[in-house]
């Protein structure tokens, strides 16, 4: 029901701006080439670095949810969902 952007990188690459650059290129493709209306992303609630990336991309917090693939006892079960639509992305691009 949605299109998700996600990524993983080695720890030695953290903090160098690669994730932001790559994610912006993916969003460019999603909105300009695929003509999608929106893109979502989610991460574990305690993953503040991924949440900061989503915010840098112009994504907006939507809500918390329990990830259905994780056991209720897992410390990673609680997740956050972010979303961005075409208009929000265009505005973000003009400010970067």
Image (cartoon, grey):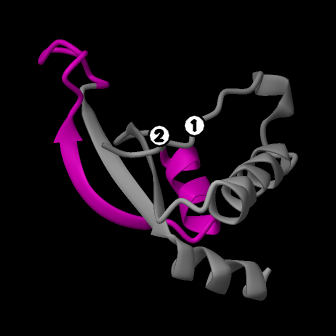
Give how far across and how far down residue 19 sits, in percent: 76, 45
- Name which residue lies at 19% across and 42% down: 65
Left or right: 29 in relation to 66: right
The label on residue 33 is none
Q: Quadrant of the N terminus?
A: top left
Q: Is residue 80 left or right of residue 43?
A: left
Mark 2 neighbour class, 10 Å CA radius: few under 14, some 14 to 19, many 20 or more: few
Q: Which mark is residue 6?
A: 1
Q: Residue at x 74, y 26 (%)?
A: 9
Q: Is residue 20 above or below residue 44?
A: below
Task: Tell me what residue is drawn at x 23 percent, y 28 percent.
Answer: 67
Q: Along the line of sight, which residue is nearer the eye, 44 or 23?
A: 23
**Quadrant hosting residue 55:** bottom right
Residue extent of the magenta highlight: 48-76
Residue depicted at x 19% and y 23%: 68
Say the numbered circle drawn on residue 47: 2
- Residue 3 position, x and y percent, is 46, 44
Describe the element under mark 2 as helix, strand or loop.
Answer: loop
User: Is 15 part of what is drawn in magenta?
Assistant: no
Farthest-out residue, left = 72
Instruction: Using the image, determine if residue 88 lies above or below residue 83.
Output: below
Classify 10 Å Cα crowding around label 1: few (below 14), some (14-19), many (20 and above).
some
**Marks 2 and 1, the one that precedes in the sequence:** 1
Q: CA distance from mark 2 to mark 1?
A: 13 Å
């Amino acid at each position: 029901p949605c299109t998700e952007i996600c990524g993983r990188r080695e720890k030695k690459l953290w903090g160098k701006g690669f994730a932001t650059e790559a994610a912006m290129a993916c969003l460019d493709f999603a909105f300009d080439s695929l003509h999608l209306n929106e893109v979502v992303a989610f991460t574990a609630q305690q993953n503040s670095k991924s949440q900061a990336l989503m915010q840098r991309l112009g994504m907006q917090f939507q809500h918390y949810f329990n990830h259905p693939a994780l056991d209720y006892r897992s410390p990673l079960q609680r997740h956050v969902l972010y979303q961005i639509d075409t208009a929000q992305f265009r505005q973000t691009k003009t400010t970067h």
